[in-house]
Image (spheres, rainbow, N blue to C red):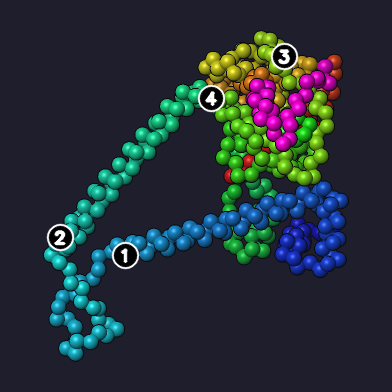
Amino acid sequence: MMTEADYYALFEAYALGELAGPARANLEARLAADPALALRYADFTELTDTLRAYGQRQQVRQQLKSMHATMLAADAPEAFIPAGTLPETGQLTSSVNPILRISRTERRLRDFWNGHRATMGVAASVAVLAVFSTLLGLEWWRAAKTQPSMYGYTVLRREVERIKKSQKDLSITLNQFGRSAATPPVARESSGTGFALTSEGYLVTSYHVIQGADSVLVEGHDRKRYHAEPVYSDRKHDLAILRITDKKFTGFGRLPYAIKEGEADLGERVYTLGFPREDVVYGEGALSARSGFKGDTAFYQVSIPVNPGNSGGPLLDERGNLIGVVSGRQNDAQSAAFATKSSYLVRLVDSLAAAKPAVPYLLPRYGQLAGNSRPQQLKKLQDYVFVVKVFE
């Protein structure tokens, strides 16, 4: 039976092109036929890419340190050798420096700089801080004009460690790359929830989940993974639309839920699915207000306990209609959560569809969940709800 180290050695040889033809063909056939092995290889690839990127960052940092040291050395005062210290022959030797003549004015300027270096540095720092404080204040003012204040409001973006394997596995991989296990690279990912918007591969999540993303992966409860890319972001309403870009993706099929264009009723029973942990989690409650944080009418307030990782999850009514997208919660009331109204999502999609994209937006108009029990609804829904993993 192969150990983890054996798998890493096999994958490394395959990636470096060191496997013989039959062995390479055999491994490729196994990867195509065995999803568990393919997932193991994908984890290996992600980890090795992280290590290479970390090595490149360390190399750049070392180069910057060397440049910094060179600049400091160049800034140091030159040695001053009084006249008459050369040998009588007038020739330079390996133990004697050349004469450096400095004018009286330049010497005074250097003395002044050396005596006031700290004061001038502080003054420059204060000036830089003042500029950045002004710019930051302007940015805050603009943000306050375009969206509600986030004081007392928590977005539900879950921060997790990208490398979840055991220390043994990590040490094995580090040793393969000739690195010291004493300083392992720390790479982070963040995650949230997303769900299918159309059968053709569009998904919805919260804007703050994918903000700043370098790459995005979506993963279902069956552990199938797909690469996705942001198509459009609506920061004001905390919405983002993604599109699956993997060629192996063949479509979702008919979505079981419809998207409600009107408003839900106050007190209506609602529920959500999300990924505050690795397994999908169900939560239920009621619609407690038709407006969100600080009266924002683009959002609902619901009495569902939500946690980091729930952001971007679907909010559904008892008939299984989508009525909102989970966004955040209030800090001082754990049971008060907020969700963007589905009507704003429909408006956003209609505006994008008017531009006639290459892959059309065909929203589900008729649901299939009404009349089913809640467990039956969840069984049909879980194939369309995903973990959204963001790598920065």
Q: Residue furthest top?
A: 266
Q: Are marks 1 and 4 in contact (CB under 8 Å)?
A: no
First in residue order: circle 3 vs circle 4: 4
- For residue 153, which numbered disc appears in the image? 4
The span picked out in magenta is 345-370
Please tell me which residue lies in front, 89 or 354: 354
Vertically, is 260 above or below 11?
above
Q: Closer to the camera: disc 2 or disc 3?
A: 2
Please tell me which residue lies in front, 202 or 264: 202
Mark 4–mark 2 distance (CA, rounded to whole Å) = 58 Å
Residue 202: x %, y % from top left: 72, 33
- Badge 4 crowding class, 10 Å Cα cut-off, few under 14, some 14 to 19, many 20 or more, is some
Name the residue located 82 percent from the left edge and 17 percent from the top edge.
370
Q: Closer to the camera: disc 1 or disc 4?
A: 1
Q: Please state if 53 lies on the left or on the right of 354 as rendered.
A: left
Amino acid of disc 4? Tyr
The residue at which mark 1 appears reads as 74
Residue 263: x %, y % from top left: 67, 13
Q: Is residue 347 magenta?
A: yes
The residue at which mark 2 appears reads as 108
Name the residue located 23 percent from the left edge and 87 percent from the top edge.
91
